[in-house]
Structure formats: structure tokens, C-alpha cells
Amino acid sequence: MPALAPIGIGWRQPHYESLLAERPALGFIEVHSENFFADGGISLAVLDAGREAYPVSLHGVGLALGSAAGLDEQHLTRLARLVQRVQPDWVSDHACFARVGSGLHAADLLPIPFTDESLALMARHVDQVQQRLGRRLLVENLSAYVGWQGDTLAEPEFFNALTARTGCGLLLDVNNLFVNARNDGLAPVAAALEAMRWVDAIRPGSVGEIHLAGHCERDDGWVIDDHGSRVREEVWRVYAHARQRFGAVPTLIEWDTDVPALSVLLSEAERAKAVAA
């Protein structure tokens, strides 16, 4: 039987008050780092209260680690200051680019090419972040709706090299794997099997956290990683496979759109515990 690992939920504004009032049994809570970059104010006070009740994971969306324009020094400074204040258990961001030129930010998670050049760039930026923060960074695989011509590395190969070169960890989003496989034209069962093959290609010991979320299937055939519903059955199967391969990895339930009652997130967290066991 796999060992127990903390199961958490994404802590979003609609549940700030109810979580602190009810104090449900959770392994940790995760927040978006950029929502707490301000100096002082009610947001930081709420996060301080959450940190007193639970371990905290800081999950960012703005570092843009794969941007050829380099890292935003102001963004990194604010993140370092937040990490120093909160002392989170985990810090993460995405394998994406968003910054171009002098300060222009796409405000989106755009896919990177999987090449040796892109790997070297990403590794430099991950090293820069880890040195500034004084801790390990987790880097999440992306749900991508376009790709680059001329990729020379398979995506798992890219992450294996990145984690080995920098000592960072992989934040494995199994829903993203399934969404990408579905958008490649695979039926649900085949998409789940393809996601499992992706998992099997990842080096054991490199995964620091797993994300679970829902997605929507549009009438035009696109599958969108919208974090707006319960985790699909096929994704639960991929998660079970990942837990068998990687063991006791902290797991998060993400829900960012059409946020339901707190009890719904807690029921998803309970299912994650059951699947892991």
C-alpha cells in the first residue's frame, strides 16, 4: 500500500473565511503567490492566519521561467520577500514563457519548445530562482493548445534533464497530461493510457507535488483545462498510476473557476486519499 502523503486544496477567496472557521482536516493549502505580493493589507493578514492553521504551498503563475527575455527582477524580489515571510513548505511555478522584449507580459502560460537551447535557458532561470529563494523550486508541466515545430526532446525527457541538472522538482499535473492527450485527438481511455506512459517516462524521485483538477470538453472538440469541475474518472486512474510509481507525493485539488462550496473541494480531497490508499 502506498504511504500516506498530505492532501491539500487550493485556497481561494470564496473560502478564506469558511476554511479558517471550520478548520477541516487537510494536509496543506495552496495559494497563488502573486495574490499576496502587496506590502501589508488584508490579503497578507489572511494568509498569515492560514499559515498558522496549515502548511502552505505557494504556487506562482508569473515567473515565466522559459522566457528568452529573462526573469522579471521585481517579480522575483516580491516572491522572495513572500517566501521569507510565509516560510512555505513548497514553492512552484510553470514551465512556460510569457515575457518578451522589455517588460511586455502576455498574462498567460505559453508553451515552450522542447529543445536543448530551451532546456539550457530554463535551467539558468530555475537556478537563478532557487539561489534567490534558498530552496528547491517545483516546475509544473503545462496544458498546451499549440506547440513548436522543431522539438528535439520528448517532454518527459526535457523534465528529467531539467530536474537532474538543477535539482528542482517536477510539479506533476496529471490533468494537464490527459488534456494534452485528448487535444492530440485521443479518445478518453487512450488519452489516459498515453498520460500513464508519460508518467512512466519520468525519473522516480523527481516529483515533488501532484495537481488534480477538472476540465471541460467544448462543442468544437477542444478540451480546456479550466479547473472548474470535479476531477474526471480517467484522470483519477492516471493519478492512481502516478502514486504507484512515485509513492507518497503531496497532492493538491485545484478549483479556480465556478468555485463550489468548500464541502465539494473537501470531498475531492477525501477521494484523493482513497485513491492513494
Image (cartoon, rainbow, N blue to C red):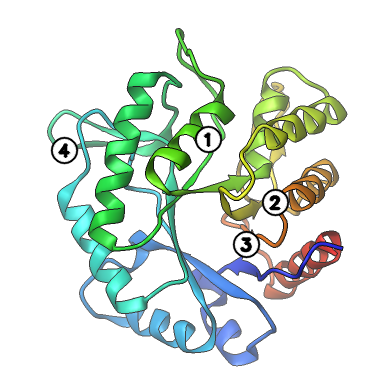
Residue at figure coordinates x 60%, y 50% from the top left: 205
Residue at which label 1 appears: 160
Residue 104 drawn above or below residue 46: above
The residue under label 3 is 259
> Can residue 66 be seen at all in this image of the molecule?
no
CA separation, marks 2 and 1? 14 Å
Q: Secondary structure at mark 3?
A: loop
Considering only order in the chain, which callout, 1 or 2, is on the residue closer to the N terminus? 1
Find residue 36 and report its horizontal and vertical position in percent: 33, 68
Position of residue 232 relative to residue 130, above or below, is: above
Query: For the residues carrying marks 3 and 2, which lies nearer the camera in this image?
Result: 2
Label 2 or label 4, whichever comes before in sequence order: 4
Determine if residue 147 is in view: yes
Residue 5, numbered label: none
Residue 146 x %, y %:
51, 20
Q: Which mark is residue 246?
A: 2
Of the two numbered discs 1 and 4 in the rendering, the one whose residue sits closer to the viewer = 1
Looking at the rendered structure, the kind of residue marked 4 is Gly
Disc 3 from disc 2: Cα separation: 29 Å
Q: Which residue is at a point 55% across and 87% down the rendered structure image? A: 20
CA distance separating discs 1 and 4: 30 Å
Instruction: Report which residue position mark 4 lands on.
Output: 103
Query: Which image quarter is the C terminus in?
Result: bottom right
